[in-house]
Amino acid sequence: MVRPRPRPQASRVLVCLGYSGGGTAPFRSWATQLPDDMELVLVCYPGRESRFSEPFATEWDPLCDEVVDAVVTEVATRPYVLFGHSMGAVMAFEVAARAERRGHGPTALTVSASEAPTDWPVPGHEPNLGQTDDELLHWMSTVGQLPQALLDEPELVQMAVALLRADLTVSASYRYRPGTTVRAPLQIVYGVDDGDDSAGNAKRWMGLGEGSVRVDELPGGHFYTPEIWSAFPSRIASL
């Protein structure tokens, strides 16, 4: 659990779960966007950043249970909001559902840029495990996940592709359990240019919330626009 700007006296917490191939870095600047009474906490999966020496996760359920344990023990003493992007959206949904069953659910859940859990695994979805390293690299560089500075470093490129492939392996092992829903207010956010059916993908989330559900369309693709991403907390309704 990474705290870019620790605020132990804050009365509430925003917990962010990242996307395939990513770490906590894309979310760290959000700490400056939050109100003073909220602390930003980022989940770092194994095999990256401070957990670089640990082996990658290989199965969805053990990784999800690890995240739930961390959230329940380290965060849930205060009201908290869960946010997940792409793979992190489905992870946040599952974490919310499992934490609710343990009596420590979030006050709200925001999911971003992802197909609904009921659709996973998505046939023909990009990126996917059947693609070559070059194809995965092309996806990362064109969608905006990989900065140009990293593309100029062959060893870092190789590490980035390996990390993405490891996370895709975890994602491929996910299976939605019929009937799983969340009671927390659910916000679904998607980019208007994120694939051929981004609006349809967002709407298929709607049946997974038992409480209030809202859908918000934003400009841009899988990561919206740089301006929107840099100030994304302002788009999280519960904040």
Image (cartoon, rainbow, N blue to C red):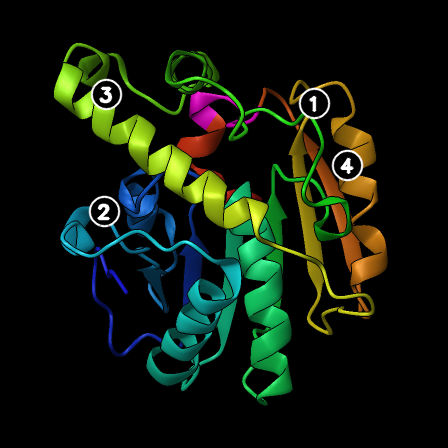
- In three-dimensional space, the C-alpha distance between marks 4 and 3, rounded to whole angstroms, equals 30 Å
Counting residues from the N terminus, which is met first, the one under dot 1 or under dot 2? 2
Q: At which x and y percent is residue 118? A: 77, 51
Look at label 1 and name its amino acid: Val
Corner quadrant of residue 224: top right
State the residue in front, 18 or 56. 56
Q: Which residue is mark 2?
A: 48
Magenta segment, which residues? Answer: 222-227
Disc 4: CA contacts within 10 A as few (<14), some (14-19) or many (>=20): some
Q: What secondary structure is found at the residue carrying circle 2?
A: loop
Give the residue displayed 73% in from the left and 47% down from the top. 116
Q: Which residue is mark 4?
A: 201
Counting residues from the N terminus, which is met first, the one under dot 3 or under dot 1? 3
Give the residue displayed 58% in from the left and 24% down from the top. 126
The answer to if 61 sits in the magenta stretch is: no
Look at label 2 and name its amino acid: Arg
Give the residue displayed 40% in from the left and 71% down from the top. 66
Q: At which x and y percent is residue 60? A: 51, 59
Disc 1: CA contacts within 10 A as few (<14), some (14-19) or many (>=20): some
Mark 4–mark 2 CB contact (< 8 Å):
no
Q: Which residue is mark 3?
A: 157
Q: Nearer the viewer, mark 4 or mark 3?
A: 3
Mark 4–mark 3 CB contact (< 8 Å):
no
Q: Nearer the viewer, mark 4 or mark 1?
A: 4
